[in-house]
Every structure is written in structure tokens, then in C-alpha cells.
Image (spheres, rainbow, N blue to C red):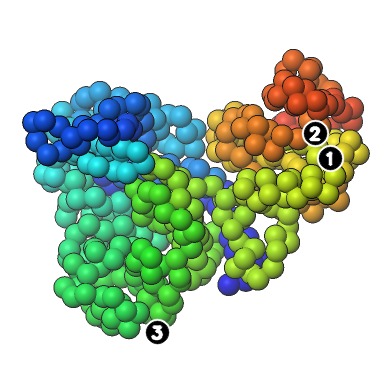
Amino acid sequence: MQLQPLLRILTGFHSARVLVLGDVMLDRFVYGTVERISAEAPIPVVDVGRCSDMPGGAANVARNIADLGAKAILLGVVGEDAAADDLRTQLQASPTIRAHLITDASRPTTVKTRYVADGQQVMRADRESRMPLSADMSRQIREAFSASVEQADLVVLSDYAKGVLCDSVTRAAIDTACRCGKIVIVDPKSKDFAKYRGAAIITPNRLEFQQACGERCDTHEQVVAAAQHILDQQICEFLVITRGKDGISVVGNGGIAEHLPTAARQVFDVSGAGDTVVAALALGMVAGGKIIEAAALANIAAGIAVAKRGTATVTTGEIVARLAPIDGSTDPLNIFAIESVQQLVQAWRAQGLKIAFTNGCFDLLHPGHISLLDQARRTADRLVVGLNADIGISRLKGPSRPVQGEVARATVLAAVKSVDAVVIFADDTPLQLIETLQPDVLVKGADYTLETVVGADLVLARGGRVVLAELLSGHSTTDTVKRAAVLSRS
């Protein structure tokens, strides 16, 4: 798979808007340790240390879309309970998710509680209703979908069999989306894929696929044969089947059959990995990718997600950092994952080189940015630039920013002569990045003071320097954006 087409597709993620309809839920993780077996029954006793809540199901698809730099419109149903309040709070933390959660007092908000002891999941407890929506709830969700579909580039139906995507809602959503010319991707739970007839793409996992076709599908040949049977029924155009350690298979009309080996380097937690796949696949299609290209990016994203704890999300920066091996080259754009940058810094230090670090949004790169980077590079032998991820900028500056996605910004930065490495970070500050890299010199603009530079105390404590670079007057991204907005209205 060539690097440049995939980079082009990733650059297009930023402008995408996806409508997600399905079963929203709250994923709760209870972490602790096990040191004894209960005297009441042969079960482990978990000594609880901490709890963590995060959006799950269709809400996790929306969260993945947001963290990949795009915008999501989320439609779902919740109960009238504390879990619904918690879920709304979680979603409000992402400014690029517009959530419309309809309250149904007759059912609970779905909560999946996973108990994890010493890194191993020992039990899961679900609180849920699997009953189809009432006629009134079905009408409300269909109306909300019809009101939102024109604003979206693509539709994802995230079916977890909790009742929201009942037959009437599913049929209405697919028919409405098709009339509006929108691609529909379905992450299925029904054993009868005919329920999703009219969707462009269906993305079952191995078990869901085997249940739908009624036979084991262990080999590539078996997968293709079973998929072709479904395609012959004209249910969908493509099947994208996630097969765990066997990677992803794409089978479609016109004889398309491609098997992508797993991109996972290590597996800690598969919770929500399917949500990551469908989110990346959706954005790949919106950005103009062919189905194989979009699936390749989704495969990489899944490999990153399963190496994280909990219901994890992925950023485009993390995907970019994994792309170079696919192209057979070695990080030609100097865009790296944090682990790779750490190794680079260690190698540079072994050569006796000094490392400088600066960070920023670098949206609409201008002469002021170039001046800052040049000054930063002159303070040391190598310069690492921390680049704010799209999701972080949206939190800091609002949903209309950044103007350019993180892949485009990183690509431009990496081409600047003064820059030796770019690493994209999703936190609001680069503190963790600075702690990890331990630069010899920390550089920020002269509009900061020593007291306001994040990480200054860490660098100084190690005997390093903090440099406040001279600003080049007359250049501001915010002012440029404002002028552009005025010109567009004139």
C-alpha cells in the first residue's frame, strides 16, 4: 500500500461529518487487585482501586470520529438515570460531537461494567434493556434522523442489539439515507443481514459473520465464499470482516477480495476495537478513499486501539506514525509516534547531541512560526516539535478550529528545514510529552513568561534551559482566520 494516497485520505478526515445512529452506552471499568478467593463461593475477591467511565457503543463510534479530527452527530436513546447524566457529561467534553440523546424513562441507560484485576478482565456485568423501542420512541428517533441526515457526509448504524435499531428504525434510516445519496455503513448485531439491505458496507466481526452465514469461516477461501453468498442477495456492496489475529478481509461486488494482515503489535484490550474500525472506515470513505485504502487505515487504527487499556480511541497522528513501514521507507516525513521520538532522542543523546523542544497548534503556518522554529533549532542540535491534535485544539479554541487537520499541519511542519521530528499529542498541554522526552532546551514565544511556560520547572530542574524566542510582529493565525471570515462574507 503506497504512503502518499493514505496520507491524502487522512488529510481529508478533518472536514468530514458523520451521522451515527445506534445503541449508546456507558462503558465502566473497575480496576483493582485479586489476592484471595471468596469464602462464600469459588470466585475472586476484587479489591477495588479506581473506576473509569467512558462512552461506549454508538457513543464510542462518535468519540472515535471526533478524536480522528472529524465531526460527529450522534443519535441514541438513554434512560432517565445517573448513567445518562454521566454519558452526556462524557460526550460534552468533545466539542466536535453533537449528541441528541432521547430520554426513555421506561428503560435504563445501558451500562457495561468490566472488572479488571491486575490487568486481566475477570468479569463483566451489564445493565440494559434489549426490548425494541416503543412506537413513540421509534417515531422520535426517525424524526431526529431525518432532520440530521442532510448535514452529514455519511451514515453509520451502530447496532448493539439493545433495541434502538429495531426493524422499523433501521429500515427508515437506510431508506432515508439512500434517498439523500448518503453512504450507509452498518456495524451489525443481527444474525440476519437482510435487515440491513441497502447499506453500502457491513462490518461484522468473525463471530457475527459466522452466525450470519451459518458456517465456520476460518480460511480466506471460506470467508470469500460465505461473503459472496451474502453479496449475491444484494444486501450490501461490501463486507469488511474483522477477524482478530487474522486481520481484516474486504469482499465486494466485482470480484474484490482483499485480506489485510493484522496491524496489532500487542493486544491489551479489544473493548471497542470494532467501533474504531467503523469510525476510521467511515472517514476513509468520506475522504475519497477506495474501500481497500479505507480498510487499510481502519486496520492500522484497530491495531493501535487494542494496544491501549479500556475503550480506547485513536488519532490520525498515531496512524501517520505507523504508515512508513507499509510504504517500505523509514519515516520520510519525520512524523513519529511518541515511542519512536523517545528512541530518536535517546539515539541523538548517545551521539552527544542536545535536544530542543517547542510546541503549538501551527495552524496556517506563517512567517512568525518559521521564525520561532528557526530560533528554536539554533538553541540545540536537534528540534522536536509537539503538535496539538485536532481534538485538543477544538477543546481549546472551539469546534471551528483548527482550520487544517493535524495530518496536513504535521506534513507541512515536517517539511520545514529547522524541524527534525514532529509528534502529535492529544492532551491539552505538552506536559507528559516533555516529561517523556526530557529536552535540554524548552522554547516558547516571548509572549509567555518563565512562570507560564508548561514544563519549564521540569526542564530547569534537570539543568536545562528555557528560551523565550523573539516574536515576529504582524503575524497571527487567529487574526488571519478572522480576516478570511470577513472576506468570505463580503
Which residue lies under the disc numbered 2?
440
Which image quadrant is residue 349 in? top right
Is residue 359 something one can see in this rendering?
yes
- In this view, the residue farthest toward the top is 451
Which image quadrant is residue 321 in? bottom right
Instruction: Please tell me whether residue 91 is drawn above or below residue 9 in the rendered image.
Output: above
User: Percent from the top left, x then y, of residue 281?
Assistant: 45, 59
Tell me which residue sits at (81%, 21%) in the image.
447
Q: Earlier in the sequence, mark 3 or mark 2?
A: 3
Which residue lies under the disc numbered 3?
255
For badge 1, the amino acid type reads: Lys
Which residue lies under the disc numbered 1?
354
User: Percent from the top left, x then y, of residue 269?
Assistant: 37, 48
Label 2: element kind:
loop
Which is in the foreground here, disc 3 or disc 2?
Answer: 2
- Left or right, 42 with reference to 439: left
For badge 2, the amino acid type reads: Asp
Q: Nearer the viewer, residue 370 or 283?
A: 370
**Alpha carbon distance from label 3 to label 2:** 56 Å
Label 1: element kind:
loop
